[in-house]
Amino acid sequence: MLNINRTGKLTFGGGVHPPDYKRLSEDCQIKPIAVPKQLSVMLSQHIGAICKPLVNKKDHIAAGQVIAAAEAFVSAPIHSPVNGTVKDITLCSHPVLGRAEAIVIDSDPDNQPKQYNSTKFDSSFNPDKFTAEKIFDSVRNAGIVGMGGAGFPTNVKLKANPNSQIHTVIINGCECEPFITCDYRMMLEWTNQILAGAMLAAKALNCKDIYIGIEDNKPRAIEAFKKVIEQMPAAKDIKIVAVKTKYPQGGERQLIKSVIDIDVPAGGIPPMVGVLVTNVATAAAIAEAVVLDVPLTYRAVTVSGSGIKNPGNFYVPIGISAGELIELAGGLTDDAVKIILGGPMMGFAVADLSIPVTKTSGAITVLTAKEIGSVRIKAKETPCIRCGRCIEVCPMNINPTKIAHAAKHNLLDVAEEYNMSVCIECGCCSYICPADIEVAGYIKTGKILTARQKKLMPK
Amino acid sequence: MLHNIKVSHSPHIRKHHSTQSVMLDVIIGLLPAVAASLIFFRAKAAIVLTSCIVSCVVFEALCNLARKKPNSLGDLSAVITGIILAFSLPPTMPAWACVIGSGFAIIIGKMVFGGLGANIFNPAMAGRCFLTACFGAMMTTWTVPATIDSQMPKMGETQNWSISTSATPPSASTVSPVPAAITSATPLALSKEAIKSKAAGKGTSAETVNNIFKYMVIGEKGGCLGETSAIALIIGGIYMLLRGTISYILPAAVLGSAFLCASIGWLIDPQYYIAPWVHLVGGGLLIGAFFIATDPVTAPLTKKGMWIFGAGVGALTMLIRMVGEYPEGVMFAVLLMNAVTPLIDRFTKLTPTGGKVNA
């Protein structure tokens, strides 16, 4: 049905080629860290309903204990990463929501950091030992959400739906954002586990075709997978696909287009075309949850950028503050200008180092004037010269300049006429704009204003 | 520690280019043609170029002052307007007329709309249009390039050379040993004559123009400053294509549709209609294709729109050249297509990847 032997480069339309800066941290092993004294575990770690706290102030909690429950279907429970005492349940800085509730935990002094041990996933691993129900329940109980950034609860994706049978699972190993290398390190270090997770996800949905899409600038990761697949009988049908290195290759629509040449309908989601896309970190978490019954409380995070003294990849508990992570990486350099939660293309700039790491934060990037461009720091936009570069690079083939212009003047119906809602907020348009217009910024603002108008969002 | 930390929307890195660098690339692309015009027309070219560029820049500065807007000269667009306006003028154009044209181009053509990015018509073409309307005679007086020996015009048939634009016998140029300026009909004027002679049943043939194709490519022919040397314009155009400053679509659409339209006439009656490749290198078609139609502000945004716009410019140019009264039509073609650009944009809306929403 699906023809993977397409000729030519496996790619999508549009996109940009920012310098990748991966060299800063691509050879740094994912390091375990000493358990921080205090963690702030956000109650909103993901897309969907906010969790209800199950613990009270001064309660003693154990590592792995559920501390906040998911009541809605589109939600995921939250577990404590450490043994400790609940210090408070209070408002805390959140990169997107501004301020949101978090459970503050004082960790016990005798905590041992969680070690990563992927030897449990050897070549004899067989997904058929687990039933689809067991996989779904484990993933739901482990509180797994998409770890690539959007944070959609994974159990929702793994629930078999009779109306749309999933025929293809694509594991997203693109990591197209500049600077970030944690997925890359995972692919090198936890290769078996990622394959196990991919097979379990496919098993839960009773689907046969598994692809792992990796950008062709990561030949070592591609090699690593191929080597493991040779020795792993259960994984012999998994196909490793080298896709073209281009931002935003790691966007799920773009990846589906590149790997199996299907367009997800505008306004639709991948299951509508029978595809499940999940990140390599999520796949690893699925394997851990199903096989070892370990909840998602730790994740790999890249701390990089030329504003960081010793860039690296760290295996950290959810809830550690950005400031502590930066200290682990040697601290900020004097010329640091921007601290970003996530990568430089889609991450959120923050000015508060107390912001905690969530299940979805894969990186902290600190930029200096060198990378931003000293002119850019002044952030002065000049008139649009209608050059059309934003249209050329838009992976969704919409008209960013028209939408931005309409949104800027609060003409939301005009913006919607130009399909504003289709925007995936990848930021290619702002990246390429010679007039330095915050094209994506205006579009995002327009989307928020529209949501408010339709009363989907509070003021 | 955090006192100098900035926050903003993502993305936080940008491609290192700016409106200024894009415009600079266009200026670099124009340089070969500037050099060619200086070689062929010497001081006359220098006067026209300087007066156009300087007055465009000054007018833009004055407009900004009057509107109490920040200085916008840094984007270099006024310089480009100046160069392109100069390129579209005959070398004999007096400096004061250049200043008037520049004033119209910048003030009426660009600044009253709100400056760069807001104008509907290509400012340089608007300026030229104004000059054509005001000083028709000046705008159609063509000098022979300085590189051509004034005693011995080598280009084309001798009977096409004359002291004035009227069909004075060629011997007239040898009457006075040092004429003030030798003028000649441009190849396109000859082409027009050939077409008209068909109706009159006389014998002027298109062959005359076809024979000077070689000179048209190099630029040793009468014409506007920047229009003369096809090769210099092509070099500049290729530079901009390689730098990604312009998309191949507009030049391809303009030249392609012009070639097609010219071919129709040529295939019907090659005796009176000049060959399509001669049309391509003649007059302002090349500068129009590479530098005027590609003005992003006044061209459509989408690829489909660009094809329509370019094809329109090419077809209208050829329509004017072959059927209309004027020998050359790039200016009118561009201005007419500029006027319909908003319409083209409206009719070439993009369909998002994955189909229409809610469709």
Image (cartoon, coloured by chain):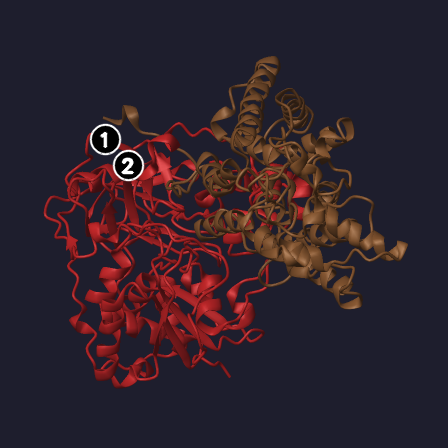
Chain colours: A red, B brown
For disc 2, the chain is A
**Residue A296's disc number:** none
What residue would you read off at disc 1? A335
Residue A395 position in % (x across, y down): 51, 56
Chain letter for mark 1, please: A
Residue beneath disc 2? A370
Vertical arrangement, residue B7 with respect to residue A127, above or below? above
Disc 1 crowd, CA 10 A, few/some/many (<14, 14-19, 20+): some
Task: Give coordinates of residue B329: x percent, y percent.
Answer: 73, 45
Assess whether mark 2 and mark 1 are in contact (beta carbons under 8 angstroms): yes
Callout 1 amino acid: Asp
Q: Which quadrant holds residue A291? A: bottom left
Q: First in sequence: mark 1 or mark 2?
A: 1
Q: Residue furthest bottom?
A: A233
Quadrant location, the N terminus of chain B: top left
Q: Secondary structure at mark 1?
A: loop
- Relative horizontal placement of residue A317, taking residue A154 as reference (left or right): left
Q: Is residue B357 visible?
A: no
Question: Residue flagged by tag 2: what amino acid is it?
Answer: Lys
